[in-house]
Image (cartoon, rainbow, N blue to C red):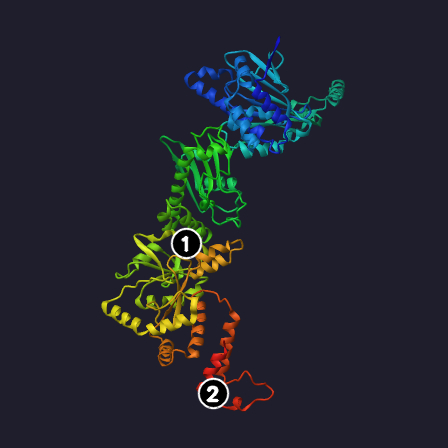
Amino acid sequence: MSTESFGFQAEISQLLDLIINTFYSNKEIFLREIISNGSDALDKIRYASLTDPSQLDTEKELYIRIIPDKENKILTIRDTGIGMTKADMVNNLGTIAKSGTKGFMEALNSGADISMIGQFGVGFYSAYLVAERVQVISKHNDDEQYIWESAAGGTFTITQDTVNPPLGRGSEIRLYMKEDQLEYLEEKRIKDIVKKHSEFISYPIQLAVTKEVEKEVEDEEEEEMKTDEEEKSKVEEIDEEEEEKKKKTKKIKEKETTNEELNKTKPIWTRNPNDISQEDYASFYKSLTNDWEDHLAVKHFSVEGQLEFKAILFIPKRAPFDLFESKKKRNNIKLYVRRVFIMDDCEDLIPEYLNFVKGIVDSEDLPLNISRETLQQNKILKVIRKNLVKKTLDLITEISEDKDNYAKFYESFGKNIKLGVHEDAQNRSKLAEFLRFYSTKAIDEQTSLKDYITRMPEVQKTIYYLTGESLAAVKESPFLETLKKKGFEVLLLVDPIDEYAITQLKEFDGKKLVCVSKEGLELEETDEEKAAREAEVAEFQELCSTVKDALGDRVEKVVVSNRITDSPCVLVTGQFGWSSNMERIMKAQALRDSSMSSYMASKKTLELNPKNPIIKELRAKVKEDKADKSVRDLTYLLFETALLTSGFTLDEPSSFAKRIYRMIALGLDVDEDDEPSAPGPAATDSSISEPAATSAMEEID
């Protein structure tokens, strides 16, 4: 039969040249592409058979079969799809420029990966990554059987097939493997690639497995000798059964080829959720994630209408140790398009704060030839993302109905919820419902914002919170004194991420969130309380200005406090700057921008407690003598103590320590200036006169 030769279209020649002459490490994708093409061909014949069932008469069974031939170094992939006519071969495999060829070349030049080849509709040519020559034998119901062949040298040939056994219908692709690509003829390698890329193709993918088996056969020579002897003697008749028993056999090794189905795990998401047991979900989850534990919760749903996709989302029981590792793969949602695996690191599929959710999404609408670049602009993907977030939040709501389960979930993924509050403005109010914090009325177990509101007294209009390093550090904080007295509950936020989240939240259920360590704390008070406070402000005006003069620019202002009842003083920060806790967190950042702290570190306000005996005594001293040096020293001591109790760090711990040691010495009647070997009369004196104590305090500076 005459062979016709054709030239490849110029762009395809360029593409083949690129594939053959460039080094790509990810060569295994050739098998995914050929299997996907086979699956498409099977889809087409199945579709054609819906209107004309006789189309399937030429081959009833629909399958894809992989046949490795190690001796001849040939890998054959056979499908019983629609097949190609001679004209299809000429058009589809070489002469008509595919619209995707140019797009793929451009994508490669701009740094894209070879694995995207199928997404541009030119996946067939990836065969040349591993093969030096390719044959395509194909039979369409409307034409004879033809062989397409090319070694990618700019031309291809098409010949009518008179040498190969008839296919009936479909295509057989023979890859004549390169010497350095023979690993793809290994049974294990093929199985791994199919599991990774094509596990959920809806047609059986079979692998021709050749095994050596031992078989017992009759030993014919022995039998002949036996028969001669028996004829001679004819002593007794042996019935047939006994004769069978006496027949001698020998074992020989034979090669046997069987077709092993590789994709037995059917796409569970295509089934009706009512027909799937928890065990099915558990085994699917384990095969998907390689987790040894069962999942905590699962959501199986489909979206129909203008857009169609099915999805299964799982929430694991534990957080992986590298959950927030920045170099880690961004998410665990695998994207399939019509059951063909596309990618598992599509960043636009689910926001970063939900990166613990595992599962699959199978879209009916996304084109198979979708690249990462076009994915970002794809409107379908935006709708899928919105649905996935909504369903994940529904799933978390379901978990929160069971207190114990939610406690496990929150322990593992509470940080993710807080990150979501910080990042996702659209779902912030919904995510806020999932937050749990300790409070002054819930020290042992965390409480939700909803529960907090139910416990609020009628006069309370806002939600109060205090941030700090640990529960032990904040639960006895001076900032809580008045609030506790009034019976107001305060949330205690001790996770570093809490402050980021809560500053973004601003309000919950119409109630503002107020930090009790920042200035401008307005507590509900009666007219009498208000009048009394205003009188105190006037009374302590002189002391406030004296303390401010002593401290200079260490504080912005000194005022009378309404938030403390026992402590002498506290330091509060500006309403819009960092709190003391945030300042501590920002200082701890290894790669921080120090210029930021200059304008974000808040100016401090020292608040004095007019009811505290120390402050009253200090006021009396100021009234007596404004220039009294001991006032200045006591002011410093109070300021530095307030720094510590208010959650700040000391700039000069050693000078603070000296003041404390001097106070200890005073308390023990020890004169530090004396030599320990020769105690002077001052040491034996049981008391220290008032002026001596005062002068000792002055010397501290």
Q: Residue 434, position in %: x, y?
A: 38, 51
Disc ID at residue 404? 1
The quarter in which the N terminus is drawn is: top right
For mark 2, give the secondary structure.
Answer: loop
Rounded to the nearest angstrom, the CA distance separating label 2 from label 1 is 62 Å
At label 1, counting other C-alpha atoms closer than 10 Å, the crowd grade (few under 14, some 14-19, many 20 or more) is: few
For the residues carrying marks 2 and 1, which lies nearer the camera in this image?
A: 2
Judge from the rendering whether residue 357 lies leftward or rightward of residue 543; answer left or right.
right
Q: Nearer the viewer, residue 229 or 407?
A: 407
Q: Residue 601, position in %: x, y?
A: 44, 59
Tell which residue pokes out farthest to the left in this image. Answer: 527
Q: Is residue 597 above or below residue 225?
A: below
For mark 1, give the secondary structure.
Answer: helix
Q: In percent of the image, x 41 and y 79: which residue is there?
A: 628
Tell which residue pokes out farthest to the top in this image. Answer: 1
Q: Is residue 283 above or below residue 561?
A: above
Residue receiving disc 2: 688
